[in-house]
C-alpha cells in the first residue's frame, strides 16, 4: 500500500472506526487502498464498521495495524498531506509539509479483510432524520445504564407503536423515559421491536452528530442485525436478543397533573436547588396554584427551594 491523504480525512476515518474498538490494546484496524480511495475497517463481537476517504493512490494494498497505536498517532499528525507506505512488516506514516515527521507502525500478520455483510431485504430500510433521532437519544439515554442488575436496564427498546410512529424506550427499573418520531416508514421496518445495547446507541448518537440530514437504517429479515449508512460510512450492529418487558403496564392511563414549564428557567432552578441536596440527590416537587415548587435538603441544615411560575 502506498497512498497520500489529508490529515483531516485520515483523522475522520480513524474517529469513525473507534466505535467498534473495545479493548484498544487488543484490537486492530484494517486499511485497504484502491484507486482514489482509502478504506478502513474495525470490528468486535457486536459491531463492524467500514469507512473510507479520498486519497492519492500510488500502489494498492491491504495492511493491519494495532488500533490504539494507530489512533494515537493519527490524532497527533501534523497538518497537511500524510503519506502512508506499507512494507511486509510495518506501515510508515510521514509528512513533509510544515515539518519532516515519520513514524513506523508494526503490522499484524495472519489477518484477513472482512467483507461487508449482505443485506438483500427489500422494503426494510428507513431514512431517518438525524436531528430527530439525536433528540430521541438525548431524552432516553439517561435511563439506560452501562451495567444494571436488571438486564433490560442496559438496552433501549425501539419499536413502532403505530404505522406512522417509532418510539425509543429506556428504563433502569426506577425511571422510564420514551421519545417518539413521526413520519412515513416502510411496512417491514421494525415490524417487531428491537433492543439496542448502550454501545450501539452511543455509536448511532455519534453518527447523528456528524451533521448529515438523514441516515439510512436497515434491519435484516431475522431482526438480529442493524445496518446504518451515511456518506463514507457503513456499520453493522448485532442487536440484543433480550425480550423487553411490557413497559406500557407501568404507564398511567390518566395523568392527574399536567403543566407546561419554560425549559431553561426550570433547568437553572434545579441546578440551584440541587446544590443543597446530599448524596441521595433527592428532590421534592410540589404543585401549587400558579407555581411549581422544588425543594431539597441535606441530612444537616442545608436547604434549598425555588418556585417557577406555571404557564
Image: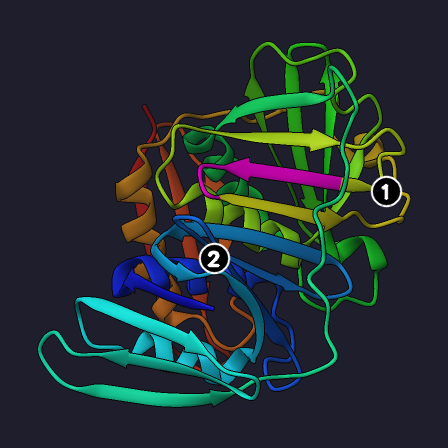
Query: Is 278 or 143 nearer to us in this picture?
Result: 143
Q: Nearer the viewer, mark 1 or mark 2?
A: 2
Give the spatial CA distance, label 1 vs label 2: 30 Å
Residue at 38 percent across and 71 percent down: it is 276
Judging depth in this view, the residue of 278 and 110 nearest the camera is 110
Q: Residues within 10 Å of mark 1 (few under 14, many from 20)?
A: some
Crowd tier of the residue under label 2, counting other residues whose Cα lies within 10 Å: few below 14, some 14–19, many 20 or above:
many
Q: Which residue is mark 1?
A: 244
Task: Relative to 93, say whether 132 is above or below.
Answer: above
**32 in relation to 298, above or below:** above
Left or right of 241? Residue 208 is left
Q: Is residue 229 magenta?
A: yes
Q: Secondary structure at mark 2?
A: helix
- Provide the residue designation for mark 2: 16
* Residue 60 shown left or right of residue 220 in the figure: left
Q: Against 223, is 152 above or below? A: below
The residue located at (78%, 42%) in the rendering is: 225
Q: Quadrant of residue 4?
A: bottom left
- Highlighted magenta segment, given as a residue range: 226-232
| Sooner in the amino-acid sequence: mark 1 or mark 2 | 2
Whether residue 303 is visible: no
Element assignment for label 1: loop
Whether residue 21 sits left or right of residue 261 in the image: it is right
Q: Which residue is rendered at x = 65% and y = 10% of the image?
A: 164
Q: Looking at the rendering, in which quadrant would you find the C terminus?
A: top left
Q: Is residue 164 magenta?
A: no
Amino acid at each position: 500500500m502506498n497512498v497520500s491523504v489529508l490529515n483531516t480525512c485520515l483523522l475522520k476515518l480513524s474517529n469513525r472506526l473507534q466505535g467498534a474498538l473495545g479493548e484498544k490494546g487488543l484490537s486492530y484496524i484494517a486499511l485497504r487502498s484502491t484507486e482514489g480511495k482509502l478504506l478502513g475497517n474495525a470490528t468486535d463481537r457486536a459491531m463492524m464498521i467500514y469507512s473510507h476517504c479520498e486519497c492519492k493512490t500510488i500502489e494498492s494494498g491491504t495492511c493491519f495495524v494495532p488500533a490504539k497505536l494507530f489512533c494515537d498517532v493519527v490524532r497527533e499528525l501534523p497538518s497537511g498531506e500524510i503519506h502512508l507506505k506499507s512494507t511486509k512488516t510495518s506501515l510508515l506514516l510521514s509528512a513533509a509539509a510544515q515539518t519532516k515527521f515519520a513514524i513506523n507502525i508494526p503490522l499484524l500478520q495472519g489477518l484477513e479483510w472482512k467483507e461487508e455483510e449482505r443485506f438483500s431485504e427489500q422494503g426494510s430500510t428507513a431514512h431517518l432524520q438525524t436531528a430527530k433521532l439525536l433528540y430521541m437519544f438525548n431524552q432516553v439515554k439517561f435511563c439506560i445504564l452501562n451495567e444494571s442488575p436488571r438486564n433490560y436496564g442496559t438496552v433501549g427498546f425501539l419499536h413502532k407503536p403505530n404505522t406512522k410512529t417509532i418510539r425509543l424506550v429506556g428504563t433502569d427499573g426506577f425511571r422510564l423515559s420514551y421519545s417518539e418520531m413521526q413520519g412515513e416508514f416502510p411496512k417491514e421496518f421494525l415490524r417487531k421491536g428491537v433492543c439496542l445495547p448502550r454501545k450501539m446507541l452511543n455509536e448511532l448518537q455519534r453518527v447523528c452528530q456528524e451533521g448529515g440530514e438523514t441516515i439510512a437504517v436497515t434491519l435484516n429479515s431475522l431482526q438480529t442485525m442493524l445496518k446504518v449508512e451515511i456518506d463514507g460510512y457503513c456499520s453493522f450492529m448485532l442487536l440484543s436478543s433480550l425480550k423487553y418487558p411490557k413497559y406500557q403496564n407501568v404507564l398511567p392511563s390518566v395523568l392527574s397533573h399536567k403543566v407546561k414549564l419554560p425549559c431553561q428557567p426550570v433547568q437553572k432552578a434545579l441546578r440551584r436547588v440541587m446544590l443543597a441536596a446530599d448524596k441521595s440527590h433527592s428532590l421534592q416537587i410540589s404543585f401549587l396554584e400558579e407555581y411549581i415548587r422544588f425543594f431539597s435538603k441535606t441530612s444537616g441544615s442545608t436547604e434549598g427551594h425555588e418556585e417557577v411560575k406555571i404557564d
